[in-house]
Every structure is written in structure tokens, then in C-alpha cells.
Amino acid sequence: MKLNALLVSQDRPSLRALGALLDVLQFEQQTCHSSGEAVELLVQGHHSALVLDFDLPGAGQVARMARMASPQRRPVVFAMVSAFTPVGGAFQSGVNFVLYKPLVYEQVARSLRAGQGFMKPNPRHSPRHPLEALVYLQLGVGTLPAIMLDLSEQGLALQAPQPLPPVQNVPLRFVLPGTSHLVEATGKVIWADDDGRAGMFFSRLTAASRHHLKNWLTKRGAKTKNAVRVLLPPQRARRSPQTSH
């Protein structure tokens, strides 16, 4: 099975240089031009390598989302940086290699070959994680993507790329895995930890969302007892500050 790479950049010269080199190394390639699209693609499919332009807004969040993937699906992350890019932020986001713009063929080739030993080929026929879905949390004026870990009629557990702020009610939305049905809700944070994990109780669901969610769970044979387990925090999770109000 071939290795594949996701290229995330708006820098055309860099994309051309990377594309030519990856062709030589026989990588399959996929390109996108925004951080939001990159997050979606990372959750939807497997990528052996992620080449991420850190001059692109939101690049650090994309890198953190990549590091949240399971070990079997976690890509090797290459950060493209320029003379004006804060390299420290790239390493804090969990990148494995740094590529300096303008890209130099020999340097990029060495880094890609060094990373190949840690890359995993695309398992085309392996089963996907049953809850591979993104949840978008509306926090103030910004939107934070997170990975859904578990789901029930009562709420969900998630993994965010950063700890959730001390808020109580959070508007959220997600598409039910394997469908085109959008669930829109307000979630009450009932626990959160310093690693970005959290449990949320649905304090409000639109009628259509509740209908689609119930049907989806029924088709999957979800057990009623799982509803409580989904909302329970793991060991050492901290209670959200707002519970003391």
C-alpha cells in the first residue's frame, strides 16, 4: 500500500515543489488551501504525512488535531515555515519536522525520507473508527473543532485540541457519522480536563436533530446503559469551574 500526504497551503511555489518531489517518492497526494478544510479531511480519512504551511491562519490547531488521532492513523507532521514564522509555536503544536521556505529540494527530500520510517500506509480496506466525526463548538466569537469520542441521546464526550474555557452552555453542531444529517444543540459542560477532553449534556436539541439522533442510535443498536457511560468523566478529570456557581 502506498503512502499518502495531505498538503495544506496557499503558497503555489511550495505546492509545486512538494508535488514534484512527492511524485518522485511515489506518494499519493491531496491538497487543500484552508485550515478548516484540512481538519475535515484529517478526520474523514487516513494520511501518512501532513505537510502544513504555518503561515496559514489556524495551522497550529490543525497540527494539534492531527496529534489527537489514534496511533494507527496519526500522520507525521511537517511544518513549512518562512523567515517570519514563529517556529516555537510550530513545535508546541507537535510537529515532527520543519521545512524552510523557499523550499530546497535536497532539504525537503532528506526530511521526507527521514519521516518515511514513521509513516503508516493508507489502510484502504480497514474499518474506520465508529465515531469519526467533528464537533464544532461555538465559544464566544470563535469556533473550536473537536473530535467526538462517544455519543448518546443525552450527550457526548469529546476531545478538543485545547482545554475548554470555563463556560457552561455551548452551542454546538455535528453531522451524524455516515449520514448527511446535521445535529444542532446546546451542550452543558458537566466535566472537563486539562487535556481537552470533556463531557457535555444536551440541554437543548432541535426537534429534527433529536429525531435524527434517535434514529441513528437505534440503527446502531445503542444500549440505554451507554447513555450514562458517555457522560462519565475519566479518572482525574476536573470538574468545570461553573459547577460551583
Image (cartoon, rainbow, N blue to C red):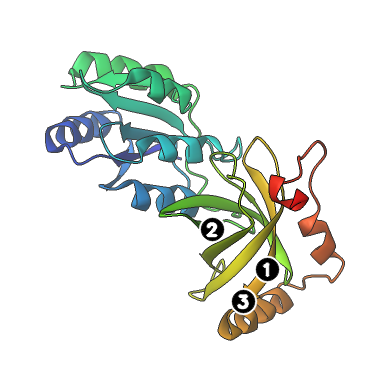
Mark identifier at residue 7: none
Q: Residues within 10 Å of mark 1 (few under 14, many from 20)?
A: many
- Residue at 59% from the left image edge and 54% from the top image edge: 128
Secondary element at image label 1: strand
Q: Residue 219, relative to residue 41: is it above or below?
A: below
Disc 2 marks which residue? Answer: 135
Question: Where residue 241 sits in the image (x, y, percent)?
Answer: 70, 45
Disc 1 marks which residue? Answer: 202
Secondary element at image label 3: strand
Q: Is residue 18 left or right of residue 154?
A: left
Instruction: Name the one closer to the observer, 26 or 105.
Output: 105
Work out how far the residue at label 2 is from the one at label 3, CA to CA, in angstroms.
Answer: 14 Å
Q: Is residue 113 left or right of residue 168?
A: left
Q: Amino acid at mark 3?
A: Leu
Work out how far the residue at label 1 is from the one at label 3, CA to CA, in angstroms.
Answer: 7 Å
Point out the tag, 2 or 3, that comes first from the N-terminus. 2
Q: Residue 242, relative to residue 202: is it above or below?
A: above
Question: Where residue 87 sits in the image (x, y, percent)?
Answer: 34, 19
Work out how far the residue at label 1 is from the one at label 2, CA to CA, in angstroms.
Answer: 13 Å
Question: Where residue 233 sits in the image (x, y, percent)?
Answer: 79, 48
Q: Amino acid at mark 2?
A: Val
Secondary element at image label 2: strand
Tell me the mark number nearer the camera, choosing from 2 and 3: 3
Q: Residue 232, relative to residue 18: is it above or below?
A: below
Looking at the rendering, which quadrant does residue 5 occupy?
top left
Q: Residues within 10 Å of mark 2 (few under 14, many from 20)?
A: many
